[in-house]
C-alpha cells in the first residue's frame, strides 16, 4: 500500500468552479511534488516543495495554486480551469529534496475532468 | 529543450512473448535514467541506470543504458498478463527533476 494518499480520486468540475486536490504522505518525508499526466503526453512536473517552501514552479498557469501547510500535506487549488486541464494529477514525496529521484513515492492520483 | 521519447507507444503481444521497450533522450543534464511501471494510477519504480553497458536485472525484467547513443531498453521475457501496464522512462536531472517520456502501453493477451 502506498504511503501517499490523494483525495478525491475522481473529480468533475465546471470551468467556473473552485475545487482543491489533497495529498497526504505518511512516510515522514520532507519534499512533495505535483505532477500532471495528460493523455498521450509525458508526465510533467508542476510544483516542488521542500520543508513547506516552494522550490520549483514549472511555468504553471496561475489557475493552479499549490499550498503546503506542513511537510505531510500538499494541496492544489483549482479555479477557472480549462477543458485542456483535464488530466491525472499525481502527488509524490521523497525523504529530502536531494535524495535520488527514484526514491519518489507516488500517490494514486486524482482523475480530473473539466467540463 | 529536454526530451525523452519512448517507442512504441503501444504494444500488444501474447503471453509468453518477449518484448523490448525503447527509450531515447536528449537532455542538458543527466544523472540517471529510470524506468517505472504504471498500473492503474501510481507509478512504481523498476530500475535506475547510471552507467553504460551494465545490465540491471529483476526476475524477467532487465534493462540497459547506452550513454553514447543516448538510449535505454527495457526487456521483459516470458511475459504474463500481470505485466500489462504503462511503462515510463524518465531522466533524472538531479535536484528531483525528472523528465518523463510519453510511456509505452503494454498489453499482454492470454
Image: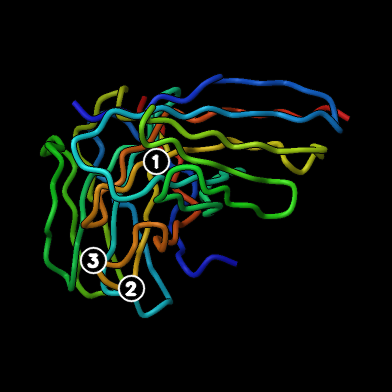
Describe the colour scheme in one phrase: rainbow
Determine crowd level at label 1: few under 14, some 14-19, many 20+ residues with C-alpha closer than 10 A: many
Left or right, B17 with reference to B27: right
Residue placed most toward the observer, A1 or A9 = A1
What residue is at 25 percent from the left and 74 percent from the top? A71
Tell me the CA gap for discs 1 and 2.
Answer: 19 Å
Question: Residue B103, image x and y in percent?
Answer: 49, 30
Question: Residue B74, image x and y in percent?
Answer: 59, 37
CB atoms at circles 1 and 2 under 8 Å apart? Answer: no
Question: What label does residue B90 carry, if any?
Answer: 1
Determine crowd level at label 2: few under 14, some 14-19, many 20+ residues with C-alpha closer than 10 A: some
Query: Tag count in the figure?
Result: 3
Locate the C terminus of chain A by quadrant. top left
Determine crowd level at label 3: few under 14, some 14-19, many 20+ residues with C-alpha closer than 10 A: many
Question: Residue B48, image x and y in percent?
Answer: 46, 53
The secondary structure type at the circle numbered 3 is loop
Q: Chain of mark 1?
A: B
Badge 1 and badge 2 both on one subunit: no
Residue A91 placement: quadrant:
bottom left
Residue placed most toward the observer, A11 or B109 = B109
Above-or-below relation of A36 to A49: above
Residue located beneath label 3 in the image: A97
Question: What label does residue A95 carry, if any?
Answer: 2
Locate the N terminus of chain A by quadrant. bottom right
CB atoms at circles 3 and 2 under 8 Å apart? Answer: no
Residue placed most toward the observer, A60 or A86 = A60
Left or right, B61 with reference to B96: right
What residue is at 23 percent from the left and 30 percent from the top? B2
Q: Chain of mark 3?
A: A
Amino acid at each position: 500500500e502506498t504511503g501517499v494518499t490523494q483525495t478525491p480520486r475522481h473529480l468533475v468540475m465546471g470551468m467556473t468552479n473552485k475545487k482543491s486536490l489533497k495529498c497526504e504522505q505518511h512516510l515522514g518525508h520532507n519534499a512533495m511534488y505535483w505532477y500532471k499526466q495528460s493523455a498521450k503526453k509525458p508526465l510533467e512536473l508542476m510544483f516542488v516543495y521542500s520543508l513547506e517552501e516552494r522550490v520549483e514552479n514549472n511555468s504553471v498557469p496561475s489557475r493552479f495554486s499549490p499550498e503546503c501547510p506542513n511537510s505531510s500535506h500538499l494541496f492544489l487549488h483549482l479555479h477557472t480551469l480549462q477543458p485542456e486541464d483535464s488530466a491525472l494529477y499525481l502527488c509524490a514525496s521523497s525523504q529530502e529534496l536531494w535524495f535520488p529521484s527514484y526514491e519518489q513515492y507516488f500517490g494514486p492520483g486524482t482523475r480530473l475532468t473539466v467540463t | 529543450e529536454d526530451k525523452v521519447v519512448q517507442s512504441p507507444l503501444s504494444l500488444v503481444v501474447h503471453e509468453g512473448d518477449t518484448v523490448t521497450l525503447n527509450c531515447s533522450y536528449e537532455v542538458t543534464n543527466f544523472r540517471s535514467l529510470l524506468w517505472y511501471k504504471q498500473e492503474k494510477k501510481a507509478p512504481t519504480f523498476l530500475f535506475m541506470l547510471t552507467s553504460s553497458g551494465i545490465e540491471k536485472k529483476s526476475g524477467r525484467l532487465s534493462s540497459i543504458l547506452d550513454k553514447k547513443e543516448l538510449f535505454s531498453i527495457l526487456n521483459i521475457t516470458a511475459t504474463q498478463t500481470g505485466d500489462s501496464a504503462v511503462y515510463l522512462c524518465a531522466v533524472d536531472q538531479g535536484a528531483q527533476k525528472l523528465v518523463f517520456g510519453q510511456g509505452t502501453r503494454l498489453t499482454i493477451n492470454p
